[in-house]
Amino acid sequence: MIRLPWLDPADPDAFPPVGRAMEEPDGLLAAGGDLSPARLLAAYRRGVFPWYSEDEPILWWSPARRTVFDTATPHVPRRLARWLRGCDWTIRTDNAFGAVMRACAHPRRDAGGTWIGASMIAAYERLHRLGHAHSVEAWDGRDLVGGIYGVRVGRMFYGESMFSAAGNGSKVALLALCRLLDERGCPLLDAQVASPHLFTLGAREMPRAAFCAEVARLADLPFGPPAWPSASARIKAAALAASRRE
């Protein structure tokens, strides 16, 4: 029986090598520690992320295969591109980070609960205040209809979760995030775990070693220019239809 390493609360950098992650469950690397900004940023730099329920200890993961988007080439399905051309939504950033997280935390119909508990929300809101975590939001007038949030380290962005309150809401937010990252020299968006929905939008899988090597390179590069969009910036969702490549 493999003994799961328990992280030292006093040392935020003390993660085991990702090659020691378990095969079953896939990618489980360690437990314990905390969700301090220093530990979270150290984890992301290693290709590690927290994922646990509120009744569990903090669990840290690095799956054998990582789901990613190449930000320059997301796939916009033909039907979605047609819909986008007539869409009058706007894209904003960091206007409603907490609201996006809480919307992502709502239990899904196909899941029994949520992994985004109160401690997770508090930790990422702190990262947001420090300028490390961001949200990209789809707005229909004054209504928040979709969004995605995640963490940026250097030129690497780690998507955490997304939601839809209207049809195509999460897709629009994801495509907008890819556009923003590509324009700022960030070639890779981490989507963590595979799903059929992500593959329809152009996601692919990378072996853990290749992913972590790319993370190590990108996380040390300076972000931009241009800078991350200000909260007052507005982007027309219809412009995302141009992302479709025939």
Image: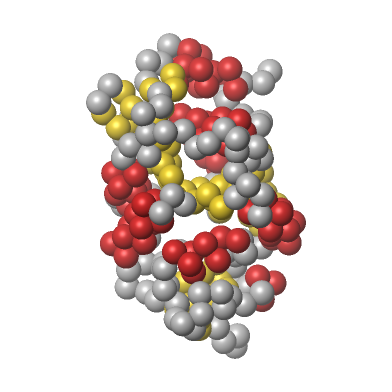
> Which residue lies at the image location 36% right of the left edge and 29% below the top edge?
232
Q: Nearer the viewer, residue 53 or 147?
A: 147
The quarter in which the N terminus is drawn is bottom right
170 left or right of 227 in image: left
> Which residue lies at the image location 69% right of the left edge and 72% below the top edge?
19
Residue 199 in view, yes or no = no
The quarter in which the C terminus is drawn is top right
Q: Nearer the viewer, residue 71 or 87?
A: 71
Would you place residue 56 above or below residue 95 in this image? below
Q: Nearer the viewer, residue 35 or 24?
A: 35
Would you place residue 211 above or below residue 7 in this image? above
Q: What x and y, as percent, mark residue 159? A: 51, 48
Would you place residue 11 above or below residue 78 in this image? below
Q: What x and y, as percent, mark residue 113? A: 32, 58
Q: What x and y, as percent, mark residue 35? A: 41, 68
Q: What x and y, as percent, mark residue 115? A: 37, 60
Q: Quadrant of residue 182?
A: top right
Q: Residue furthest top?
A: 86
> Which residue lies at the image location 60% right of the left edge and 22% below the top edge?
243
